[in-house]
Image (cartoon, helix red, strand yellow):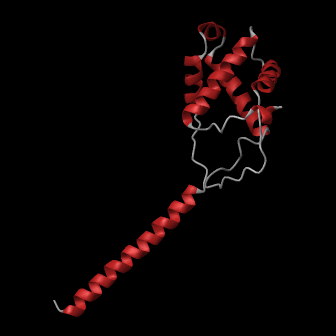
Amino acid sequence: MDGTTIVFAIVAAVCVFAIAAVAIGREARRLDSLAPRVVYWIDEAVDFVCDRIPEESQARLTPDEVERLLVLHMRWLHAKGLQPDKVGDRRQDIDEQVVITEDTLIAYLLGAAEDEGVELLDDVDAVAVVDAHLDYFEAIGAVGPEAGLDDVL
């Protein structure tokens, strides 16, 4: 091997390293600005919620009824702008603060459950389902920061 070949090999290796470093750095910066991907599986959510609601609520609600309540909850979140249609590679662009309270959610679920034919024998069942569903959101990483008292009032 002559000196020219060695120099070209070193220059080629440095160029390949520089191109790779720039490409990886750019991709890392792009991924850092994207919302983390959270995957919501309804079957997994139903199992999670059914396992965590109190035994009294488990006795009164079937898994199908829990699933219908979870779907109603997800529809409510979508109506509030918290469940966008297209989220793949979407930048975090939340412009306005959205604060939800459990009271408004429970009131919505009680009314919507009646419209959907889900018979809630005790209102506490809706509260238990919502609490467990919010725990599921936290477990999969889909929960934002908790609002302060100033934001709720």
* Residue 130: image location, x then y, percent: 68, 23
Residue for point 61% across, 32% down:
137
Relative depth, front residue between 37 and 29: 29
Residue 7 visible within the image: yes
When the figure is inspected, residue 68 is found, relative to residue 152, above or below; the finding is above
Relative depth, front residue between 146 and 25: 146
| Quadrant position of the N terminus in the picture | bottom left
Left or right: 119, with 41 as reference point = right
Relative depth, front residue between 39 and 134: 134
Question: What is the total number of numbered labels drawn onto the structure image?
Answer: 0
* Residue 44: image location, x then y, percent: 55, 29
Tell me the quarter of the picture where residue 120 sits: top right
Left or right: 25, with 127 as reference point = left
* Residue 15: image location, x then y, percent: 38, 80
Residue for point 71% across, 41% down:
83
Q: Residue furthest front?
A: 150
Residue 42 visible within the image: no
Left or right: 141, with 149 as reference point = left
Tell me the quarter of the picture where residue 74 sits: top right
Q: Residue furthest left?
A: 1
* Residue 31: image location, x then y, percent: 55, 57
Residue for point 59% across, 24% down:
46
| Quadrant position of the C terminus in the picture | top right
